Image (cartoon, helix red, strand yellow):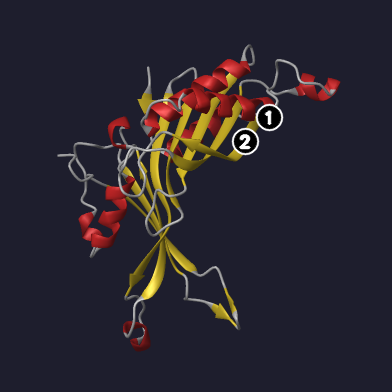
C-alpha cells in the first residue's frame, strides 16, 4: 500500500535496504505542457528533468562482460525514453503530479526485465519563480512497498530583508537567498509554487509556521543565506546560512 513519508525518512529507508547501484540522468532540458508558469497560467514552459533509477540488484554481470545486460539500464537509452515520454504527454496540459507519474511509467517501460528498487523524478520549471532560479516538484518512490516522498520546492529566491545584529546592518535591506521545500505535499497542491513564493514575501516572523495537528506529514524545510555576510577582498564567499524544519499547516488546509 502506498504511503507518503518525509524525504528524510524515505532516504533513510533506501539506505537501510541498500547498498544499491544507481543510474542518473540530470537536467534534461525540455519544453513541457505541464505545471504553471510564474503567472499561474497553464501553458507550455521550459523545464529541467532529472531521473534517478535505483536498481534492485548490482550490475556486476554488466561490469564483468563490459556490456549492457538486464542487470542495468543504459543512461543514453534512459534519457531518450524520458524525452519520448514527455513528447507523448505534450498534447494536453497536465499537472506536475501527472507529469512525474508519466515519466516514471516511461522509465519502467525502458527498464523492461531489469529489477527496479526505486525511481526518483525531479521536474524544475526554470520560469516558475518570479524572484528565484526556479520552482519544482520531486517524487521519490520505492516500487515494491509503495513508500514515497513528495516535495514542492522553490530555489534561490532573493528577498530583501533588514537582517543582522550590527547597527549599520539596520540601515538598509540586504539580499537573503531562500530555498524552501514543502515535504509531504498532496498531489492536488503540487502546482501552488506561485502562491508559496507570494507567501514568502508576506512572512514577518516564524510564528506563521503554525504547529499542525491534523496533517502530521507536512513539513517545511527552509534554508536562508545572507549572501553579503562574508567578504574576502573583491570575492564574495558563499555566505552564512541557517536551516529550519517545521511542521506546518498550509494555507487553505483547514
- Check disc 2 and report the residue beneath it: 25
Density class for disc 2 (Cα within 10 Å; few <14, some 14-19, many ≥20) is some
Name which residue lies at 66% across and 29% down. Answer: 21
CA gap between label 1 and label 2 equals 7 Å
- Label 1 close to label 2 by CB (< 8 Å): yes
Name which residue lies at 32% across and 85% down. Answer: 171
- Left/right placement of residue 130 relative to residue 232 reads left
**Residue 67 position by quadrant:** top right
Judge whether residue 189 can be spotted in this image: yes
Check residue 75 in the rendering and tell me which mark sits there, or answer none: 1
The mark nearer the N terminus, 1 or 2, is 2
- The quarter of the picture where the C terminus appears is top left
Judge whether residue 115 can be spotted in this image: no
Density class for disc 1 (Cα within 10 Å; few <14, some 14-19, many ≥20) is few
The answer to whether 162 is drawn above or below residue 251 in the figure is below
Q: How many labels does the image show?
A: 2
Identify which residue, 125 or 145, lies in the foreground.
125
The answer to whether 6 is drawn above or below residue 62 in the figure is below
Name which residue lies at 30% across and 45% down. Answer: 40
The answer to whether 55 is drawn above or below residue 133 in the figure is above
Name which residue lies at 45% across and 28% down. Answer: 90
Amino acid at each position: 500500500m502506498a504511503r507518503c513519508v518525509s524525504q528524510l525518512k524515505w532516504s533513510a529507508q533506501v539506505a537501510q535496504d541498500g547498498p544499491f547501484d544507481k543510474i542518473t540522468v540530470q537536467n534534461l532540458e525540455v519544453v513541457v505542457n505541464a505545471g504553471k508558469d510564474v503567472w499561474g497560467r497553464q501553458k507550455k514552459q521550459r523545464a529541467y528533468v532529472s531521473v534517478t533509477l535505483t536498481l534492485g540488484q548490482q550490475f556486476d554481470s554488466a561490469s564483468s562482460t563490459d556490456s549492457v545486460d538486464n542487470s542495468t539500464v543504459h543512461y543514453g537509452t534512459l534519457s531518450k525514453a524520458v524525452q519520448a515520454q514527455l513528447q507523448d504527454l505534450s498534447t494536453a496540459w497536465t499537472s506536475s503530479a501527472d507529469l512525474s507519474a508519466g515519466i516514471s511509467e516511461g522509465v519502467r517501460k525502458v527498464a523492461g526485465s531489469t529489477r527496479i528498487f526505486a525511481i526518483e523524478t525531479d521536474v524544475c520549471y526554470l520560469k516558475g519563480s518570479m524572484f528565484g532560479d526556479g520552482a519544482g516538484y520531486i517524487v521519490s518512490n520505492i516500487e515494491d512497498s509503495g513508500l514515497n516522498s513528495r516535495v514542492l520546492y522553490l530555489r534561490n529566491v532573493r528577498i530583501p530583508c533588514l537582517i543582522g545584529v550590527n547597527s549599520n546592518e539596520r540601515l538598509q535591506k540586504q539580499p537573503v537567498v531562500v530555498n524552501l521545500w514543502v515535504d509531504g505535499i498532496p498531489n492536488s497542491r503540487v502546482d501552488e509554487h506561485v502562491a508559496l513564493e507570494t507567501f514568502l514575501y508576506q512572512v514577518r516572523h516564524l510564528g506563521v509556521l503554525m504547529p499542525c495537528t491534523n496533517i502530521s506529514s507536512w513539513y517545511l524545510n527552509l534554508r536562508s543565506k545572507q549572501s553579503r555576510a562574508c567578504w574576502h577582498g573583491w570575492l564574495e564567499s558563499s555566505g552564512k546560512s541557517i536551516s529550519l524544519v517545521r511542521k506546518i499547516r498550509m494555507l487553505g488546509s483547514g
